[in-house]
Image (cartoon, rainbow, N blue to C red):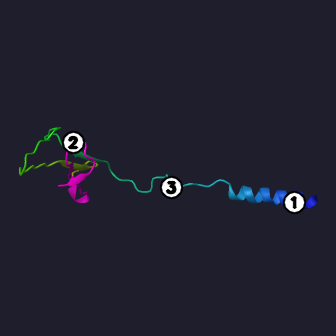
Amino acid sequence: MKRNIIKSIILFVASSFLTGCYNDKSSLDTVKFDAIEIESQSIPDILRVEYLENLTLEPVVKIGSGVDQSKVSYKWEINVSPGYPDLVEI
């Protein structure tokens, strides 16, 4: 009987160590960076390009308070037809 109580106490202590508090640091910010804004005031909401036509877009990319496009890269993608989920890089 005494051994069962001791085993129960040891089991309880061991299980409390295994399920004790864990400090999860994965949700903390590790790297801070400035906000990135893409201004496209001169670009209309809907663009239509016919077969073999060229389309030139020049958005202004702002990082924080300045314009420095050397720190970012971007690509243009379109869908083949409306509602088609796969995108094609231009």
**Where residue 78 sits in the image (x, y, percent)?**
20, 49
Q: How crowded is the residue under tag 1: few (<14 C-alpha within 10 Å), some, or many (20+)?
A: few
Q: Magenta span has 71?
A: yes
Which residue is found at the position 56% from the left and 54% from the top? 24
Q: In terms of depth relative to the viewer, which is nearer, 64 or 86?
A: 86
**First-in-chain label (3 vs 1):** 1
- Label 1, label 2: how many angstroms apart (C-alpha)? 70 Å
Q: Amino acid at mark 2?
A: Pro
Cβ atoms at labels 3 and 1 below 8 Å apart: no
| x then y, percent, for residue 15 | 73, 57
Which quadrant holds residue 42? Answer: top left
For mark 1, what is the residue? 6
Mark 2 lies on residue: 82
The amino acid type found where label 1 is placed reads Ile
Q: Can you say whether 2 is above or below 54 in the image?
A: below
Disc 3 residue type (three-letter): Ser
User: Outermost residue toward the left?
Assistant: 53
Question: Which stretch did the figure color magenta?
Answer: 68-90
Can you tell which of label 1 and label 2 is closer to the viewer?
A: 2
The picture places residue 54, in percent across and down from the top left corner, at 7, 51
Q: Are marks 1 and 2 in contact (CB under 8 Å)?
A: no
Query: What secondary structure is found at the residue carrying circle 2?
Result: loop
Where is residue 33 drawn, in percent x and y? 35, 53
Q: Is 60 covered by the magenta stretch?
A: no
